[in-house]
Amino acid sequence: MGAPHIVKQETSNLLDKTMSRALTTDLYHQDTAYVAWRTGRTGTATFDLYIRGAPFGGAYVLVAGLATALSHTTSFRYTEEDLQYLAQLRAYDPDFLAFLRDLRFTGNISAMPEGTVAFPDEPILQVRAPFIEAVLLESGLLQSINLATLIATKASRIVTAAAGRPVSEFALRRAHAPYEVARAASIGGCPTTSNVAAAKRLGLQPTGTIPHALVQLFDTEREAFEAVATTLPQYTLLLDTYDLHQAIHTAVEVARQARQRLGHDLVAVRLDSGDLAADSRYVRGVLDAGGLDSARILASGDLDEFSITKLINTNAPIDGFGVGTNLGIGAGSLEHRVAGGTLGAVYKLAEYEDLAGTASARLKLGGDKSSWPGRKLVYRAGQYAHDIIQLASEAPPPDAAPLLRPVVQSGTLLPESSPPLPEIAAVAAANLRALPKQWRRLTVEHAYRVQFSSGLRALRERLVRALQEGREP
């Protein structure tokens, strides 16, 4: 895992304004936009993007995906090809298609910066824009935030479980969106990736060992190890292709010869299966006895935060972890009865201001899928004492910091909205260090305290009563 680190800033096409993003939406949003256009419902809407519950049985999420969400927003436009397709798809009024031809995002967006620790019900991102613009963005925004925040949160839990031992992202072959996974995992605390393309594009350190196929390519394991040790000045050997107990002795013999003859160093050995705790102890003993006490032991193989915690608790002498599938798909755990695989963020209309300037709060009812109405702000009291969600019209609470920051103003991306990835990762690490241990536990019995202001609760109660009585709120 000792590849050279090429320091490079993120150079992606996240802000490529030549890309067409308009059809990255669900069909019903196109129809919704058409109905709104035909009926003149083109006033200003406020939408909140938030999660209803924390994933994996934990208390929090680590916000990520904002850069992709903003790219989707600022690149939003219909090409002539898009419009021709829509004309074939639906009998839309030609004037509506002409309206779409010139449509650009002109509204405002506030968001929690990437690397912020957030909790259920809190608006992570808030859009205030003409209704049609805001509703057409929904699918792209949700896809961006859902995936990246899920993976960043999963990575942060795995890194917490590793207790200071480095964790590398190995998810390329299993991840549904490998580039986005590598980026989000780095925000969550995995600074290295096996994904060479993502490493180049993001400025991350590429890392890796050797595969079983390279060992199998040679007639004997010794020949394979000798080929690696001769070819690479710094190298890692994989021990579990055949028999680990035999492989480690062969590895030590080969490594000592390579060091003496060539000055090449065995940097690490990797265990990818079996009883990782017992095997790592055996391997550590053989390495130390052979004078290779500087060689690290790396573990991989269907690991997650729960299995890593178990290894750490048994004092297994493992120096680092490579995590692939469970990180790359944001998996839950059947054994521990925690859900994963999706974040479940939603995007709900909170207020609509008509063309005459009359604003009215909007509310969705539906049991645990009910929403909170009105234009809102989110504050954090102290060092995670509690959070407060309140109406924008209410006075800010004392000794509390606002969590939402402007990132797009009148359709223009603000310069401070997209800091470099290393800066985001550093902010995330600091935020997680400040998070009290009780909220960093892998599973929690009680949710973090998020208060709803008296004004917000009163507004919601009034709207609920009006809807139940069948009258205008």
Image (tube, rainbow, N blue to C red):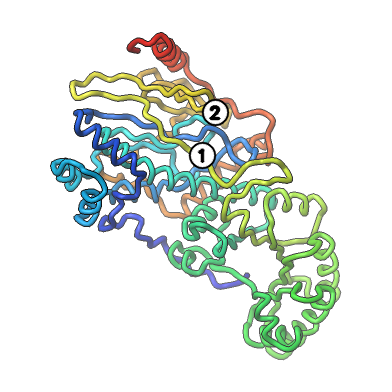
Q: Foreground residue, 19 or 427?
A: 19
Helix, strand or loop for disc 1: loop
Locate residue 144, reporting x and y percent: 43, 48
Say above or below: 340 vs 6. above
Tell me: 133 left or right of 223: left
* Of 420 and 121, the residue lying toward us: 121
Classify 350 as above or below 473. Answer: below
The residue positioned farthest toward the bottom in the image shown: 261
Considering the image in quadrants, where does the C terminus appear?
Answer: top left
The residue located at (69%, 79%) in the rendering is 265
**Picture quarter containing residue 438?**
top right
Q: Is residue 357 above or below residue 431?
A: above
Q: Which residue is mark 1?
A: 344
Mark carried by residue 91: none
Q: How far is mark 1 from mark 2, CA to CA? A: 28 Å
Res. 463 image quadrant: top left
Rendered-image quadrant of the N terminus: bottom right
Point out residue 288 in the picture as x, y percentages from the top left corner.
83, 72
- Which residue was labeled with disc 2? 382
Circle 1 residues within 10 Å: few <14, some 14–19, many ≥20: some
Residue 296: quarter of image: bottom right
Density class for disc 2 (Cα within 10 Å; few <14, some 14-19, many ≥20) is few
Residue type, label 2: Gly
Estimate the x, y position of residue 217 in percent, counting from the top left: 67, 85
Q: Residue at x 78, y 75 (%)?
A: 292
Q: Position of residue 216 (x, y in %)?
A: 70, 82
Task: Identify residue type, mark 1.
Answer: Gly
**Among numbered discs 1 and 2, the one appearing first in the sequence:** 1
User: Is residue 36 positioned above or below 182 on the image?
Assistant: above
Q: Of discs 1 and 2, which sits in the foreground?
A: 1
* Residue depicted at x 43% and y 14%: 464
